[in-house]
Amino acid sequence: MNLEVLLKEYANDGRCFQIVDGISLSKPRHIHLAGLQGSAAAFVITAVFNHPSASQLNHLVILRDAEEAAYFHNTLENLTSALDIFYFPSSFKNKKNYRLLNSSHVMLRTEALTKIATAAAIAGVNKKIIITHPEALFEKVVLQKTLSANIISIKQAETIDVNDILSRFVDYGFERTDFVYEPGQFAVRGGILDIYSFGNEKPYRIELFGNEVDSIRLFDPESQLSERKLLQVNIIPNVETQFETGDRVSLLEFLPENTVVWTEDWQFIKEKIIQQEEDLELFLSIAKDIPADKKQLADDDTEINERYNITENDFVKATVLEDKIKERNIIEIGKKAFFPAISRLPSTINFNTKEQPSFNRQFDLLIKNLKEYEAKKYNIYLFADNPKQLERLHVIFTDLKAEINVVPIPTSIHHGFIDDDLMVVCYTDHQIFQRYHKYKVKQAFSKNKALTLKMLRELQPGDYVTHIDHGVGVYSGLQKIEANGKMQEAVRIQYKDGDLLYVNISSLHKIGKYSGKEGSIPKMNKLGSDVWNKLKEKTKKQVKDIATDLIKLYAERKSQEGFAFSPDNYMQTELEASFIYEDTPDQGKATEDVKRDMEKPSPMDRLVCGDVGFGKTEIAIRAAFKSCCDGKQAAILVPTTILAYQHFKTFGERLKDFPVTVDYINRFKSSKEKKETLQKVAEGKIDIIIGTHSLLGKDVKFKDLGIMIIDEEQKFGVAAKEKLKQLRTTVDSLTLTATPIPRTLQFSLMGARDLSIINTPPPNRQPIQTEVMVFNEDAIRDIIYYETERGGQVFFIHNRVKGLQEMKGLIQG
């Protein structure tokens, strides 16, 4: 019994046949599906989508907001595994600013429109599902015939006019660059043409032999390395910026006539579109009042794919959309039908479903609930983001001796539900554990571009760089040089006495931006001199000398007997399963490495290295809790007072449902409070203590310390590090850092300390972006609005206390 069996139950349900019969008629029908809770609607749509009698029908699903649409899209993708389900978002970053475009969203819209236009021209092509929301529906899209006429198709082995192709790229708004890393760019290097089309997740690399297309490959914008071969590609322009207003229609007019419209709470959707109309009117009136000289300046600063001059004719009114929807088959989901009747009242099809109850991580209640449904002969399905979560649930059920016949399904749905008609229970692990469940949206390009390429793009002529073989020089830009009879791009580096070095693009890994002491000017090397090699040898010798004593220490630690912690019990499994985010692969591996070391008889000394926000603190919480499960204490050592309190709040929140006591000491506590806390530590009444270097003082006594966790060890002084050296020979030690000092990292790489690296960012993690600009009220308003709209926070730092109130008034206004 698996997911296919569950989907088959819905496909064979008589109500599914009723829906298909209704939407297959020539005259538009209005159907209301009442009583669908949780993700039950996604199962019904999947059943209708896959039904043989509806094989030629397209579907447009309009939901109340962008987030709900994205979650629904993920659920449908997971249920169907189909390639013809598209998320259709708004093209703008900010729903009140109609100039700033979102490159990822433009790509998603272009992909959907292109696939629909292509399918319309070919008989028998698979049907599509488009999932959208009011802000996206408000925007007009390009005409099908206009889009089809402007697609550039390139096939392997065909002869092309290269100059004509490049000219068309420029006409379509593509920007010529040295490296292609986001949609709307192309690059030419000898016989290689790189192009990042809108409507495709990765760019194309076209190799030419004269004017003949020798090969076509996808390539990775991070590494710039080629991937799989393709026989044909379609180059698609930016559909949001490259076409005239007269070439635009509503999405309803773009979609084929056989499209079925699904809506949830049409009245609410209509009101949101009307609100968009009012926001647009306000935006256009403000834009109209901008002085001509400032408009010209804005146009001069316009970036490709980022700014877009709009008019009210680029959008469609709510009343027009409503009229267009009336021409289609309409299916409404929810408690009540809101859409105006087409000819008569809608036919209602009733479902008897309930939302998954909340168990607040109380497994006795969950097990009791599941046993009740099992006794009633219900089929029970547990959905999880990955097999690891299902394993954790199985361990918990086994430890609690709960014998329940459950079907595990390693795929994600957003909301669990109970269907009393089909006698089905579908629960999700993230709701059971109250874990954070986030949708995943395809990105237009990787946020973490290859380090060497990123640095090269950020380098300015005059910046100091280091070549691994030739030493320190000055970056002088990119230059085309002839090599083996071909023109190739190379990095130009100037050395002492005017010496020049040209480095091929394929050797970028040998170059790094100079990273010496801030503000110091490095001494440039001379090509052909042995000074650089002597410096490298001297540095190697110093590292070896420093390492000798410490290696003896680590050898002593390895030879000593420590405490071997027990394997995970059900509480450890429950803690890890209750993590509100999904573990990344690197985070999961690091956790297993730490726990495996703790279960060995020799003291652990492991360094976990990962960027901010990659999940190091969660690994520390799991390690500390594992120590507590064996009756031992854990000490968390942090470099700052603020971080001590922050960790206290984080540890306390994560462990509040478990029998452990967490406390902290810092300089904000009175002497009396500190003394009481340390007394409890000595008596074993506190399981996890968090503090700064004061935790290493002589007055701190532990009843039975099991693990010392050090956050950012490089920020501690020499005395603190000497104390840590002594502790490491007797208790387990875990060090967390985002920026290890060279010595710490060197020891880990040479094996004196164990190393775990977390390279994988969490899904949908927002990149850290830094920009320097002149003071601009419009930019501040847009940034603050965009961040608050997505549910984020904004910290505004001003350089003068006197001007705080004035700045506060400016922001509020």
Image (cartoon, rainbow, N blue to C red):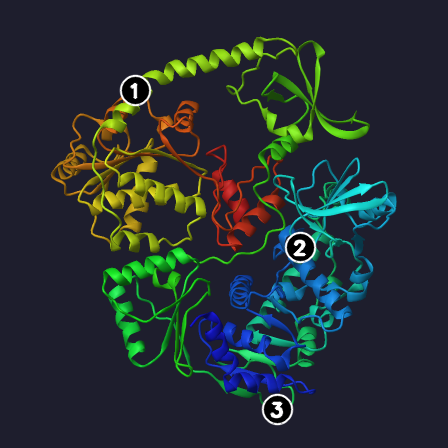
Residue found at the very far bottom of the displayed protein: 344
Helix, strand or loop at mark 3: loop
Determine which of the numbered discs, if any, sits on residue 510 in the image: none
Q: Mark 2 points at which residue?
A: 107
Residue 217 position within the rendered picture, expressed as x and y whole percent measured from the top left: 70, 47
Q: Earlier in the sequence, mark 3 or mark 2?
A: 2
Compared across the picture, whether 100 is left or right of 360 comes to right
The front one of 606 and 303 is 606
On screen, residue 804 versus residue 710, left or right, reads right
Q: Where is residue 568 in the image (x, y as percent from the top left)?
A: 26, 50
Q: How crowded is mark 2: few (under 14 residues within 10 Å), some or many (20 or more)?
A: many
Which residue in the protein does label 3 denote? 344
- Estimate the spatial distance between the alpha carbons at disc 2 and disc 1, rounded to whole Å: 57 Å
- Residue pictured at 58% horizontal, 34% vertical: 451
Determine crowd level at label 1: few under 14, some 14-19, many 20+ residues with C-alpha closer than 10 A: few
The total of numbered circles placed on residues is 3
Q: Which of marks 2 and 1 is in front?
A: 1
- Identified by mark 3, the residue type is Arg
Give the mark nearest the N terminus, 3 or 1. Answer: 3
Residue 289 % position (x, y) = 72, 51
Q: In this view, does 157 lie to the left or right of 254?
A: right
Q: What's under tag 2, amino acid-wise?
A: Met
Classify mark 3: residues with Cα within 10 Å, few (<14), some (14-19) or many (20+).
few
What residue sits 28% from the left and 60% below the top? 396
The reply to whether the C-beta atoms of the residues labelled 3 and 1 are less than 8 Å apart is no
Residue 121 lies, with reference to residue 743, above or below; the image says: below
| Amino acid of disc 1 | Lys
- Can you give x and y, in whole percent of width and height, for residue 535 in the image? 52, 11
Spatial distance from mark 3 to mark 2, Cα to Cα? Answer: 40 Å
Disc 1: which residue: 552
